[in-house]
Image (cartoon, grey):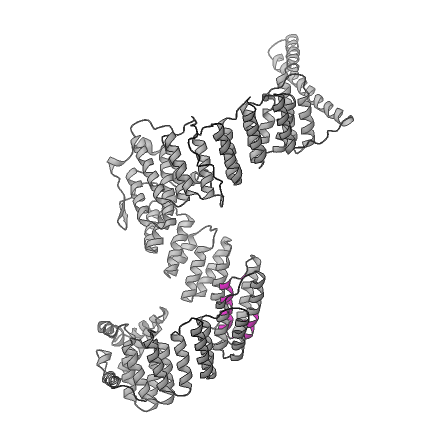
Amino acid sequence: MHRARLRLGSIADSLYRFRPHEHGRKQDANKMVFRRALLISQAWYVIVIFLRLSATQNFENSLLYAIFSGIEYLGNEAESTKFMQRQIVDALRVGDRSSASNLLMELGQEKHSLTADNFVGILSYCARSPDPLFVMETWKIMEERGVFLDNTCTLLMIKALCKGGYLDEAFGLISFLGESRVMFPVLPVYNLFLRACGKRQSTVHVSQCLDIMDRRMVGKNEATYSELLKVAVCQKNLSSVHEIWTDFVKNYSPSVLSLRKFIWCYTRLGDLKSAHTALQKMVALVIGAAGQKLPSLELDIPVPLRTEFYHDNFNFEENGPSTDEVYCKKMVPCEGDIEQFSVNGMKCGEVESGRTLPSNYRSNFVMKVLRWSFNDVICACALTRNCGLAEQLMQQMHELGLQPSSHTFDGFVRSVVSERGFSDGIKILKIMQQRKLKPYDSTLAAVSISCSKALELDLAEALLEQISACVFPHPFNAFLSACDMMDQPERAMRMLAKMKQMEVLPDVKTYELLYSLFGNVNAPYEEGNRLSQVDAAKRIRMIEMDMEKHGIQHSHFSMMNLLKALGAEGMTKELLQYLNVAENLFYYNNTCLGTPIYNTALHFLVESKEIHMAIELFNNMKHSGLFPDAATFEMMIDCCSVIGCLKSAFALLSLMIRSGFCPQILTYTSLVKIVLGFERFDDALNLLDQASSEGIELDVVIMNTIVQKACEKGRIDVIEFAVEKMKREKIQPDPSTCHSVFSAYVSLGYHSTAMEALQVLSMRMLCKEHDTSPVVTEYVEDFVLAEDSEAESRILEFFKCSEESLSFALLNLRWSAMLGYSLCSSPNQSPWAMRLASSYDDGYTA
């Protein structure tokens, strides 16, 4: 015992080094204060007893009884130590640690013998606070007085040390008590220490605790397995969870609560199959116990260790939410009945009486645990996008008589919309409304995101308006992205106001979209002017200031969208300035700026015909170690088409091929522009054949390039050959094609041929395949030959749906019909089209 006491004192001294107590007058004064307080309390005790008795007895008897009671109180040592503990706790509570230490010394100098009960009040407060330093000070006093540590004191001391983060000292105390051969720590002590290790994510201490439990043959109860499961989830170690389950079923019969914990772990770690299997075991357990007593929900008998698979070190990454947090999810009960309904074949309505649990179990805690487990698995289905399993679980809940809550529908909606889209999500929201269940904000956000992806902006905006709180800006970003695609910045402005009202913090994705939405003013409809450029500069500056306010730095996409906005407004000087800023910013962040950002700047420099700046930027790219990609070479070849330098274009083409990039349709378009600059139409057509031979699909842009140049030069033969080639290559003409062909014939005085060609090209614009004449007939009957006054208004509606080509073709056909020109039933039956086909078969001759 003497050796053990010395070691215990050394452990205490290693953590807390006592300050030398003041002596002399100060110590005597503290003693007098304490004794005075004790005497005053004892005097009040005598007075209270006397006053109570004097009301019912005579004065002499009351006085004598009160005096003798006071004498008994003064001699009661237990009451004295309790009072001293209260004084110490009060001093600690107000932060007067010096007085608390002096009072603790007084308690340790009491002449009568002390037990562990005389320190329980102090240790209990230190465990709640926590105050591990004062625990060690108390521990040292107890050791000096030879006080034996019981289980209560040990548990409180370990709890204080663990909560205070002193895991080394807590483990030292556990080790010491186990080696002292006087008292062995009970299993709750180890469970408490394991829980603290999990919260602190201490890999070493978990292994140490499991090792010492193995050496001392300390068994495990369900609480131990629960703590080990939390450790495995924090570590994201699914294999450990499976091993824990294997060891658990060897020693225990799974109960509802134990299955609940394993289901929670499986769903957190993404093992949907194991979670579903455990859930079905729980259902079978509850159904089997419906007519008899349920098995014990918790076993207190620990079982010895049989395996050593817990001895590996744990590597923690994240600390997920505790089981209690999942348990405390608010459930909204279903009020009233609802008629049978169905979502994609999933029937939810009347319940089969044969498989329904008795009514006395529906309000049972076991049924609540069962519903929580269903909710966990359904929410895991949303994360894994397993809509089919989610529907099966919803059906099973109805068969068991479990009413889905808002939390249940939250996971179900998110799993459905991820696979089937927003329409089914809207149906489920209507079902929740009928059941008087308020959807979670996350439910509305999931459906809103699905609506935004489908470009259903009205529905998406209506759902976002119903959200009361949102932690992440993802649903708003999805809506802003849809507004960007649909070119509706006004809607985006309203949603930004909603974000500000809800205090939703934007992220870098938000600012990437803001630059794309509001960075330019006139583009793409008009060219930038001085007024629009000033307005665009103000907008960009406002977005940058908001980024600085929220501490968000530029990403590659935000900088790229900013450069696009400047280039679209023709602000080349500012574009190069921001490119220089981006180079410095990403350099200091040890990040490569990347070729795509340089390509963005190159594109607008070439577009604005700033050729020398584009060449200088291209050379800077090569000198800085950046490797040009296919887009870079294509833009530089296009730059050669602006200056008409064929030699440089072929030199770049050679460099492009040597760098491992094959020419694409844009490359051939630029080469065609160059040779057409020299009016070499035969070479241009040869380039078309070369591209086709290399498996490159021709598009309307390269064909329009030839047609426009031929229109300028009056080359009707080239135009007719190109139009027939477009037909055979199944390339749909666009308004630019119609304009060039029509203008060429009109300029040469062939007005009837011009109208016939316009009709043929317009009819080819109406259908994607040239043999789908019923589609053309339908358009002609409904819009072209319609006699109502609203026909043209209905045609113009296609502009609002971003179908400008369709509106253009219908208006051309309608106006030609109004001028008296007859329409052919098929574009290929027109004499002009038949002549072009015959001439093409004969071959083109320059």
Q: Residue at x 38, y 54 (%)?
A: 447
Horizontal arrangement in the rendering, residue 286 relative to residue 139 (left or right): left
Q: Residue furthest front?
A: 658
Residue 793 is left or right of residue 554, and the answer is: left
453 up-or-down from 717: above or below: above
Q: Quadrant of the N terminus?
A: top right
Q: Position of residue 70 (x, y in %)?
A: 65, 14
The overriding secondary structure of the stretch rendered in magenta is: helix
Q: Position of residue 508 (x, y in %)?
A: 50, 59
Nearer the observer, 225 or 49: 225
**Residue pictured at 26% horizontal, 72% vertical:** 769
Please give left or right for residue 73 compared with residue 391 in the image: right
Please state the extent of the stretch shown in magenta in the rendering. 553-577
Q: Is residue 701 above or below residue 449?
A: below
Location of residue 124 (image quadrant): top right
Q: Is residue 200 magenta?
A: no
Q: Quick check: 737 above or below 801?
A: below
